[in-house]
Image (tube, helix red, strand yellow):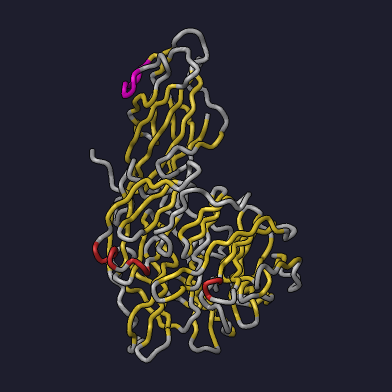
Amino acid sequence: MTQGSPQDGTPSPQQDEPAEIHSQLDVSATTGVIIAGRESDSKGIVNVGISVENQHEQAETFDPVVKVGESQIAIEVDRGGAEGPDENSSPPVEIPSTEKPVSFSGRRVMPANQVYDLTINGKQVGVVDLQLQDTPYHLGTPGRTKPRMPAVGIGTGRIAEPTLVTEFSYGQPDQIPDIDQLQHGRIRAITEDKIYLMFRWMRTGGGLIDSLAALDRWTGEKAWHLPSTPPSEIAIVDDVEYILTSESREKMYVIARSVDGTNQWRTELSVPAQNVDGTNLVPAGDYLYVSTADGVAEITRQSGEIRRTVPGVFGMVGDNALFTFGGESPLSKFPLDGSTTTPEWQQTPGNGTHKRGAVADGTVYVSSYNSGEEIEDDQIELHAYNEGDGSNQWSKVVSKASDTVVGAIPPGLGQLFVRQGYVMVPSNQGLAIIETNSGQEMGGSLGERNGRALSPLHPLRIYGVGKEEFYVTNIARGAAVPESEISLPEPLSRDNGFASMLYGQGIMYVVTSSGVYGYSAALPET
């Protein structure tokens, strides 16, 4: 018997101890979940798949009672064997002796924020988890521990269409009177009540200034909105807001306070001289890893004390080690126990490491910027190293200078996502999907949709914002295959070039220069 795991409507079985459902038939089950997040009364769309095989000579009757919790699910034959029952017929059915299993499927909408047992004929065969989860910091952003994403989704078009469930504006911080326009907005975290955002504004007299905001995630009502000199960042861990903010180009602070606004500690740090647009605050375990002028500071989350500072610009954390990189410094590995500031090994790819890195499944990924004699020759490479000994596994050019009518645009690289044997690399060349083992690029990588928001929620699906559409792409078939597209609201389609997106509490939030938009699954008609 297999135990289903909550996925985006597609069965994704996990092996469990067999449970005898029928004395003469082999029965297995999978489940799939899509969340329909709402301001009140969120739901989960539960899809159940059952496979039945008869290895005996005579036909056997199969008449299951399938329940999620105490609620029964009506099932129908989805696919029969060569001599099996007709599709769409309902149990009881005769299962003939055949090599081809008979498949059944059913669906039920259930209240969210609960965990249910999945049973067939009174035997537990799995667990259906419909709990709504926070996204306490920007999972999947370069540098976050083993880039992880929630494994549920908001619909694919085949099973449940993504639909707009909330939208609101965010406004400017009152403390900055001379703002000209927004350069970009980024979603940093989502909790039960709030959405946390980071903005970068262009000032009327020139220069940039950041602001950090906590808003009600349904109405946009402001909890707080504070100005900050770059770099800036937010993470929420164990109901504590960790805020990286700068008051000048010389001093910055990490501030810890409870979500109700009570300050816990404040630690002063030196502002890094360059590369401030990387990942500057990485929570991992009991520590925060923060970019400073002196290196990456390891700060105790409970007290704010600095345990050590190691060479490098940005930090990222694997299973057993801290890695630093950036600013043309080497990729360096340090033990997590805080015992030394001397690296176990170092690697210097190309002209030195750049702004993007990730650690997943025993591999460290880091970018390097290689400059040519002319801007047209500039390129960015992605390198994969063994986490244990630092040996190079592969290197691949993932971004080059782009030609325009007015000249060449330098290569750029967005977030790195590592998922199910692929590393996903958005750049000005499009979204490249690269096999982690070989470094080979998957066919069908997405060219036009680069530079805009994306999130690989489901293990093998990518949710994204294109030029004028919200789209879902499936990469489960060895290629990037478009699965669903829906038109965006006019304000979002008009200026989504600044889009950022993040999933939490059953909602995919997208922020642009015109506001915040929340998508979730449409409920099926009853």
Q: State the residue in front, 525 or 17.
A: 525
Residue found at x 49% / y 31%: 125
Q: Is residue 294 left or right of residue 400?
A: right
Q: Quadrant of residue 367?
A: bottom right
- The reply to whether residue 337 is visible in this rendering is no
- Residue 365, x across and y down, in percent: 61, 61
- The reply to whether residue 258 is visible in this rendering is yes
* Residue stretch in magenta: 86-93
Image position of 448 with respect to 185: above or below: above
- Residue 91, x across and y down, in percent: 35, 20
If the image is split into quadrants, where does the C terminus sit?
A: top left
Residue found at x 46% / y 30%: 29
- Furthest residue in direction bottom, as rendered: 205
Image position of 259 with respect to 62: above or below: below
Image position of 456 with respect to 201: above or below: above
Q: Main secondary structure of the magenta part?
A: loop
- Furthest residue in direction top, as rendered: 58
Q: State the residue in front, 97 or 319.
A: 97
- Residue 468, x across and y down, in percent: 30, 59
Number of disc labels: 0
Image position of 430 with respect to 172: above or below: above
Find out whether residue 367 is within the magenta segment: no
Residue found at x 27% / y 63%: 167
- Residue 410, x across and y down, in percent: 50, 73
Q: Is residue 346 left or right of residue 118?
A: right
Q: State the residue in front, 184 or 92.
A: 184
Residue found at x 61% / y 64%: 366
Find out whether residue 87 is within the magenta segment: yes
